Image (tube, rainbow, N blue to C red):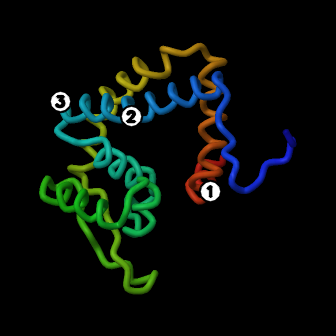
Amino acid sequence: MSTEQTADEVPWLRRDQQEHWIALMGVISTLPAALDAQLKRDAGLNLYEYQVLVQLSESPKGTVPMSDLAMLASGSLSRLSHAVGRLERSGYVSRVACREQGRRTAAVLTEAGRTKLEQTAPGHVREARRLVVDALTPEQLTMLGGAARRILEVTAPDVAAMLEP
């Protein structure tokens, strides 16, 4: 058998690779659900809404154009629009025109939104520590972070670039 693969050959995973892949898929499917459940239970927010508030809070003026915010929060414009609508009804976010950037709309974090985030963050951090940070050794956490950044470079280079120090 030739060591060169033809275009039709499938590079099947070895058993050890498959085991790692299955474990990763388990994390990808269960971790967001666990974080989402804690946020809904304790704060009445879902994980995506929380991420939107976090991204807005990290902006110097608490304002981010909707298209940029969709990318930062890893969602489509449609998903973001629905989430911002829910956050607006709760008084946590408002929408404004971005005159300096053409005819764009931006989301703005309100004082009520900042307060909600400050109240919500401690419980979310405790859950993130319980589920991930404290479950790993410092070395494992460093390796996980490096691996996650590398995967992001392949799946979402624009997002990976934003994470660079």
Compared across the picture, whether 161 is left or right of 135 comes to: right
Q: Mark 3 points at which residue?
A: 41
Q: Mark 3 packing: few (<14 Cα in 10 Å), some, or many (20+)? A: few
What is the C-alpha distance between the residues marked 1 and 2?
Answer: 22 Å
Q: Mark 1 packing: few (<14 Cα in 10 Å), some, or many (20+)? A: some
The one nearer the camera, 80 or 14, is: 14
Compared across the picture, whether 1 is left or right of 127 comes to: right
The image quarter containing residue 19 is top right
- Extreme-front residue of the structure: 1
Tell me what residue is drawn at x 56 percent, y 31 percent: 21
Q: Mark 1 points at which residue?
A: 157
The amino acid pointed to by label 1 is Pro
User: Residue 25: image x %, image y %?
Assistant: 47, 33
Q: Is 161 above or below relative to 129?
A: below
The image quarter containing residue 108 is bottom left
Q: Is 64 above or below relative to 53?
A: below
What is the C-alpha distance between the residues marked 2 and 3?
Answer: 19 Å
Q: Which mark is residue 29?
A: 2
Tell me what residue is drawn at x 20 percent, y 55 percent: 87
The one nearer the camera, 75 or 62, is: 75
Q: Is mark 1 on a helix, strand or loop?
A: helix
Q: Nearer the viewer, mark 2 or mark 3?
A: 2
Tell me what residue is drawn at x 26 percent, y 69 percent: 95
Q: Is 6 above or below relative to 105?
A: above
